[in-house]
Every structure is written in C-alpha cells, then in structure tokens.
C-alpha cells in the first residue's frame, strides 16, 4: 500500500499512513436493498484514510477577524450617533465585508451536500448582523414615529448589545466545539 499513500496529496489536510484501511465490500447494484457477504459473488476494494483538516489559518486569521467585526457592529448599538441611520450604515457595511469573506472562503472550502462548520459560523455572523440592523431600525421607528426619547430606547440597545455579545460567544463555541486537531506527526 506504500504506492497509494506515498503519492497521495490532500491540500489543507493531514493524515497518518498507519490509518489506511483496505476492505473488500459487496458490490451493490440493481434493486437490492440488503445483501450479505456470503450471498454476493462480486465485491470491490474499499480504501479508507481518515484525514484531518489543518485549520490553523482559519483559527488564527479568519475567526478572530469575524469576531472583531461582530464586536465592532455590536458596539455601534450602544453609541448614540448624531445621525439615526449611522449605526445601521456601519453594520450593513460590516455585513457586506462578511459576505465578501464568505464568497472567498466558499471557493476554498470543499464542495459538499451539507453545511460545514465554517459555513455555519459565517451564517451565524450574518444573522447576528441582520438582527442588529433590525433592532436599530425598530429603535429608529420608536424615536422618529412614536416619539420616544433616545434615553428611553437606550435600554433596548443595551439589551440587544448584551444578547449580541452572548451570541458572538456562541459563534466562537460553535467553531471550537468538538474540534479535533491532527495528532502530531501527521503529514
């Protein structure tokens, strides 16, 4: 099996040659739902090799940047701008930056039929910003259309900012929860 493993290259992933497994499996074809090994005359060689994502770049560059952008957007809620729409404009600008990051990352992530962890993190960041923009617009409506004083709506901003920070911590937890790093000595 040295020929298979020695010439194997999986970018951004590590693996241990000793984890390589070869197993003959029954060849499923036609309308057969279940088949046992003794009933099947045809089989194929299944080769499996567990790989580990080398995510150091995402851990030290991408995630901290996303978290910091979220913190900046959250702090916009607690500041009373001279213009009522300034906070919304800043948060939407940050959302566009995050969309750009998402498009760049999606081109480098594996194309699979399910949502991978980094995509879930990016979605959560976008939903956090969307919620904060919605909150900012509700406060604007209360002040401009319902006649509330800005001092009366400050508590709404503070509660939203606290919830935003908690959700930001949740995003960090999503990313690092169950993280399996490649053991030392991986290629």
Image: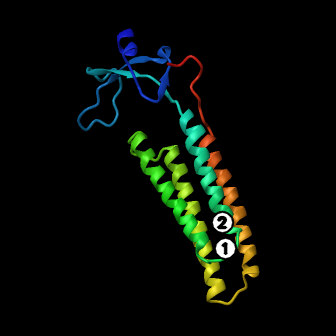
Judge from the rendering whether residue 127 lies leftward or rightward of residue 40; answer left or right: right
In three-dimensional space, the C-alpha distance between marks 2 and 1, rounded to whole angstroms, equals: 8 Å
- Could you tell me which secondary element the residue under label 1 belongs to? loop
Residue 182 sits in quarter: top right
Name the residue furthest left. 30
Q: In the rendered view of the protein, which quadrant contains the N terminus? A: top left
- Could you tell me which secondary element the residue under label 2 belongs to? helix
Q: Nearer the viewer, mark 2 or mark 1?
A: 1
- The residue lying at 62 percent from left, 80 percent from top is 140
Residue closest to the eye, 88 or 29? 88
- Among numbered discs 2 and 1, the one appearing first in the sequence: 2
Q: Which residue is mark 1?
A: 81
Q: Which residue is mark 2?
A: 76
- The residue lying at 62 percent from left, 73 percent from top is 136
Position of residue 124 relative to residue 8, above or below, is below
Position of residue 32 relative to residue 173, above or below, is above
Query: In the rendered structure, are the residues bearing label 2 and label 1 in contact, judged by CB atoms less than 8 Å apart?
Result: yes
Q: Position of residue 170 (x, y in %)?
A: 65, 51
Label 1 Cα crowd, 10 Å radius (few <14 / some 14-19 / many 20+): few
- The residue lying at 66 percent from left, 62 percent from top is 74
Residue 83 sits in quarter: bottom right
Position of residue 32 relative to residue 78, above or below, is above
Q: Position of residue 60 (x, y in %)?
A: 60, 38
Q: Position of residue 138 (x, y in %)?
A: 61, 78
């Amino acid at each position: 099996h040295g020929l298979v493993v020695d010439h194997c290259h999986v970018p951004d992933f590590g693996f241990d040659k000793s984890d390589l497994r070869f197993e003959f499996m029954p060849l499923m074809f036609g309308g057969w739902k279940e088949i046992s090994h003794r009933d099947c005359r045809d089989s194929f060689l299944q080769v499996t090799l567990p790989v580990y994502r080398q995510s150091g770049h995402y851990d030290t560059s991408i995630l901290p940047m996303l978290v910091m952008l979220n913190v900046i957007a959250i702090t916009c809620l607690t500041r009373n701008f001279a213009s009522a729409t300034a906070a919304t404009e800043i948060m939407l600008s940050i959302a566009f930056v995050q969309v750009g990051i998402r498009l760049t990352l999606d081109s480098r992530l594996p194309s699979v039929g399910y949502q991978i962890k980094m995509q879930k993190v990016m979605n959560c960041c976008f939903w956090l910003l969307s919620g904060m923009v919605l909150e900012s617009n509700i406060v604007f409506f209360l002040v401009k259309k319902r006649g509330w004083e800005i001092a009366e709506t400050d508590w709404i901003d503070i509660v939203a900012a606290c919830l935003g920070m908690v959700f930001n911590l949740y995003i960090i937890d999503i990313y690092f929860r169950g993280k399996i790093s490649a053991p030392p000595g991986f290629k």
